[in-house]
Image: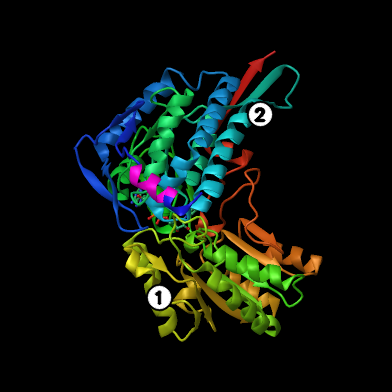
Amino acid sequence: MPTTSWHERAAALRIDARAFIDGERVDARSGARFDCLSPVDGRKLAEVARCDGLDVDAAVTSARAAFEDRRWAGKAPGERKKILVRFADLMLEHRDELALLETLDMGKPIRYSRSVDVQLAQNCIRWYGEAIDKVYDQVAPTAEDSLALITREPVGVVAAIIPWNYPMLMAAWKIGPALATGNSLVLKPSEKAPLSSLRLAELALEAGVPPGVFNVLPGFGQEAGRALGLHMDVDCIAFTGSTRTGKDIVQMAGQSNLKRAWTELGGKSANIVCADCPDLDAAVSAAIGSIYFNQGESCNAPSRLFVEASIKDAFLDKALTMIPDFAPGDPLDEATVMGAIVDPIQMKTVLGYIESGKADGARLLAGGKAARVESGGLYIEPTLFDGVDASMRIAREEIFGPVLSVLSFTELDEAVRQANATPYGLAAAVWTSDIGKAIRTSRELRAGTVHVNQYDNDDITVPFGGYKQSGNGRDKSLHAFDKYTELKTTWIQV
Ligand code: NAD
């Protein structure tokens, strides 16, 4: 597909950014809107409905009515399955449009929006749709004069609040299991990237998800987000975002109706490369590819690289030859592998971390500044710091940008201790030829996902979530059903 074609399609795109409540597009009750600007070139994409507490009330009322009359929960799992599979098919039919919305809205390269984001998101919806008529309830092993059934029921009205870095995929990770299990959903996308979620709601309706079952409220965290967190008629809140906001969400759940609060939060993942690493080229390629993928805006990005001192020079030589391949380019060009940073706030945050690394004495070996300024968009060079000390901010805090901090070690125990010495526990990796060492290290790493001799393997079949302050829930896999269902025991006298 020639580049001009994506630019032409972008220019021709008509974007409806009104909210989606009870099966209809509506303006915010207050009439308020906010501008959605593209980080690709600074162009205004749409005026988005700025939902607040009034809209939250309307959406929750609609979701509650849909849940109570069982227009969705009451359908046989096989019926819900057909509709969710049709929804996934429609996502594929509209693949280019969804990919374009995602790229324009948050800046990621079109090649990945198309082949990763839409692909994984539709697969997620399809997988949960196909799973739901294959899950059985249980009979407990009780005494002979009774029968105890253990059944799963939908929790009711689910509010999902999601971030901007994988807008469609994070939406799908909530929509798939929440709808498959029969809940009604009110989804609040990030104010920084709301467009794909709104389009998904229309496609779900077209596929047969009844009105009221899936509502989308664009808006700000302090307005629509807070109103959802505090709402007395929301049964469960499924949150993905920063650890700071996650703490607010849990507090709001406690202050209101003790709604179930699930959190999927930030990370500062450690990637440990030992001298007996089986394939140094693969280790370099994974370390570099994973930190710069999605402009470094990935919760599980391996942003702390621990390399055993004896191989560090060889490792860095190879890394520095690869980094130019990740130079930021036009996200609408299919050759581009690194796109734009989501907005000026995030741009300033990342550049601020780069300055702090320099000020703290880390050695800047690549990148370090804004790029493609003439485009009117927001771009940062792939950046690498060597000589990073564990006490520096760039080694402790989540940067959420294309910045790699390299630390070296001589004792693996010390590297593991440092790897664990953050409040986060989302992902980690160890590279070694010694299987015993790999397993021991994996056991010692306090993280929800540990990779051995690779990074970023991904499949909908495995759970994803964090230890410690990286959150308390698991998205993906059949384990996600636990978030959206209540267990009921029914005793029957025989
Ligand atoms: P954020 O916490 O600023 O915002 C996330 C969402 O919460 C947005 O929709 C926002 O509007 C809303 N929000 C903000 N303040 C709120 C409040 N007081 N009450 C209710 N809602 C509120 O995070 P972000 O910048 O959008 O996303 C980046 C973060 O998300 C990073 O920390 C990243 O690691 C994390 N993340 C985690 C995962 C995971 O699965 N663990 C996946 C993707 C991103």
Q: Is residue 175 something one can see in this rendering?
A: yes
Residue 392 lies, with reference to residue 47, above or below; the image says below
The residue drawn where x is 69% and y is 76% is 412
Q: Position of residue 447 (x, y in %)?
A: 61, 60
Q: Could you say which disc has been placed on residue 369 in the image?
A: 1
Residue 307 percent across, percent down from the top left: 65, 77
* Mark 1: secondary structure: loop
Asked whether 142 or 96 is in front, the reply is 96
What is the magenta range? 5-12
Q: Amino acid at mark 1?
A: Lys
Characterize the magenta stretch by its predominant secondary structure: helix
Corner quadrant of residue 387: bottom right
Q: Is residue 7 found inside the magenta-colored segment of the image?
A: yes
Q: CA distance from mark 2 to mark 1?
A: 51 Å
Q: Residue at x 35, y 58 (%)?
A: 39
* Secondary structure type for disc 2: loop
Query: Which badge, 2 or 1, comes first in the chain's sequence?
Result: 2
Is 459 left, or right, of 227 in this rendering?
Answer: right
Q: Establish whether ligand 1 lies closer than 8 Å to the Cβ of label 2.
A: no
Seen in the picture, residue 405 relative to 237 is either above or below; the reply is below
* In the image, residue 453 above or below residue 25: below
Q: Is residue 257 magenta?
A: no
- Residue pointed to by mark 2: 135
Instruction: Please provide percent x and percent y for residue 6.
Output: 43, 49
